[in-house]
Structure formats: C-alpha cells, structure tokens
Amino acid sequence: MPRKNYTISLLPGDGIGPEVVASACEVLESLEKIDGAPSFSFVKQRVGADVFEETGESITDEIISACKNADAVFVGAMDVARLPLEARQPLQELRRRLEVGASIRPARTFPGVEARCSHIDTVVVREVTEGMYSGIEYSAGPDAACSVRLITRKASARTARIAFTEASKRRGKVTAVHKLGALKLTDSLFLEACREVGEAFPQIEFETRNIDACALEMIRHPEEFDVILATNTFGDILSDVAAGLACGLGLAPSGCIGERWAYFEPVHGTAPDIAGKGIANPLAAILSAAMMMRHLDEEQSANAIETAVAEILANGGPRTADLGGKATTVDVTKAIIANILNSHTRR
C-alpha cells in the first residue's frame, strides 16, 4: 500500500520559532522510517515581525492561499508586539481566513518533570475569533478608549461542539466558564449556545462555573477538570494557568481547529534572549506536531511522538535549561527520534 504524503505549510515565525519548528519537522520526518507511517512535504513561508521589517508585509494573501491548499499548517512563535498597529496580525489573519473555531490547549503533568501540582490532565477549549479580542476598538476622546466584547451564538456553538467532541474522547465532562454577574447579555448568550449544543451529547456531564471560582478551583483541585470551555479572553488566561500548574509553557502544545482548516503551534513566545543559541526547548513544538498528526487521523504517529516525549522525560533523558537540564535543542530532538525508532524496532 503506498505511503500517504501530507503537505504541511510551515510558518516558522520569529525568535526561536524557526529552531523549534525545524526540530518538530525532523521528528515528523523520522516517522518515514516506520512502515505504514506517512511522509511529508514541507512548504516554508516567511511571516511575522522579521519579514515585516524587511518587506513591509507580515503575512500575504498568497501565504494564506498556500495554507488553505495544504493538509495542515504548522506555526512557530511570532513577535507580534514588534508589529505596528497598521500591520496585519498573522495569527488573527490565520484564525479569520482559515475559519478556525477554537483553540485546543491540553495541559498535563509528565512524570520526571517538576510541576506545581501532582496531577493535572485537562484541555482548555477557547473561542478565538471574537470576545475581547474581536479587534473592535475605538477612541472615546483623549482620555478614554473602548474595546467591544463581541459574542455570537454561531461562534459560541461552534466552539462548544469542539469542546463536547473533545470530552467524548476523554473523561466525559465539560465545564463552561462565565461571569454572568458582570456580563449578563454576552455570557448568557454564550452559555445558552453551549447548553443547546450539549443536548446532542447526553453522555457528557455539563457544568458551569464563574471564571474566578474556576481559577481558584483549578489551583486547589485541578484533577476535577476535564475539558474547560471558555470565551476568548477567559480561555486565554485559564490555559496559561493550566500550563503553569502542569510543567510550564515548554511542554504546552496547541491547535486551532476549524471545519475545513487547522493550524498547530507551541504556546510559548519568541524568547529573543536565547534565539540562535541552540538551547530552546523543542518539546512544545514536537507535542504540537503530535496534535497535528492526530487531527490528520494518524493516531499511531501521534502516539509514537507523545510516548517518546513522556519516556525521555520520565527516564531522565536530555532536557533544556527551562526544565532543569543543560541539553541543546539538537540533543533533545535526537533523543526523541531515537526513542521513536527504537520503540518501533522493539515491536
């Protein structure tokens, strides 16, 4: 049977983005040595602040078209703070033009890595096109400015469907987060849309919690949470809380999922202080690549990558400075690849 080939559009970004994206690609390419695993054609595109300073374009329509024509999109960190207000924001453009409905951010503890809590295994599913990040802002005079929190039934329901589907693959519980006392109209609409979607998933336990109470209970009893469903800003904050309780941003992958297109990226930033030094932690990018494989229904490949990461960490394998080690990016990448190939040989 011929090997399946996937075209992956690469947007390495700025800072350490190109370094960790390259590591993830090396891990994916190592799968080609395994019978039945897919192969890959990588198409690299330049986006972000560095290319903007050179060309005046942070992302182009041609790049968006290439992303739409690919099987999946893999993104590195981007230094959006360096982009002027008039510049196109690459991630906002990707979310809007690829019509993604939600960000999926898993957070879990790994044996062998120090964490703030003994056990957390949760997923934050966050709407990513509207809310406080809708981009609707305006000046209200020299001493005031307004930002509009836009919530629609369509976007809320789309995100809820992704959350309930995710919960059906896990422990079967969804917690929808709100602040009804202060945001009566917008959060009422959000929760109403979530409940309506939940009716199609009677096997899933559904609950609601205030954002502040949810943040408190995540720290006190993180094991109680399975899938957290949230609007844009609340989900952004809670996903970082979850990562902080687990093993930090160095092990935090993510994917932005839509009905037709999707892109995947490590959660961490560009880390300009270590860019080019070869010491960036590639594991979040590698785990994001595993999420991409699962999205492409390549379950065996996804499991192989995730198992390799877990075993390297549990067995005292090489790790970068942010995880308490002295290894380089190359050291960690080579260890992950060796584990994948050795595990396949043992089978």
Image (cartoon, rainbow, N blue to C red):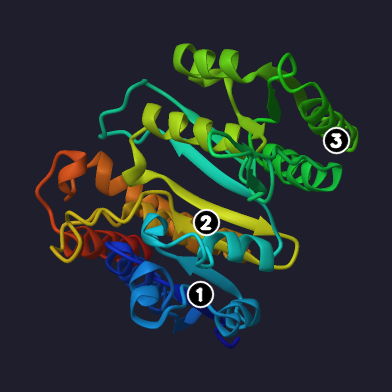
The image shows residue 31, relative to residue 267, as above or below, that is below
In this orientation, which residue lies closer to the viewer: 270 or 102?
A: 270
**SS state under label 3:** helix
Q: Nearer the viewer, mark 3 or mark 1?
A: 1
Kindly identify the amino acid type of the residue bearing the numbered disc 3: Ala
Q: Measure the C-alpha gap from mark 3 to mark 2.
A: 27 Å
Name the residue at 53% across, 61% down.
91
Instruction: Return the disc, 3 or 2, that comes first in the chain's sequence.
Output: 3
Location of the N terminus by quadrant is: bottom right
Identify the mark at residue 291; answer none if there is no mark: 2
Instruction: Return the disc, 3 or 1, that comes first in the chain's sequence.
Output: 1
Name the residue at 63% across, 46% down.
137
**SS state under label 1:** loop
Q: Nearer the viewer, mark 3 or mark 2?
A: 3
Kindly identify the amino acid type of the residue bearing the numbered disc 2: Met
Q: Are marks 3 and 2 in contact (CB under 8 Å)?
A: no
Residue 57 % position (x, y): 47, 77
Q: Measure the C-alpha gap from mark 2 to mark 1.
A: 24 Å
Residue 118 % position (x, y): 36, 21
Residue 60 % position (x, y): 55, 79
Q: What residue is shown with label 1?
A: 59
Q: Give the quadrant of residue 83.
A: bottom left
**SS state under label 2:** helix
Q: Is residue 63 left or right of residue 171?
A: left
Kindly identify the amino acid type of the residue bearing the numbered disc 1: Ile
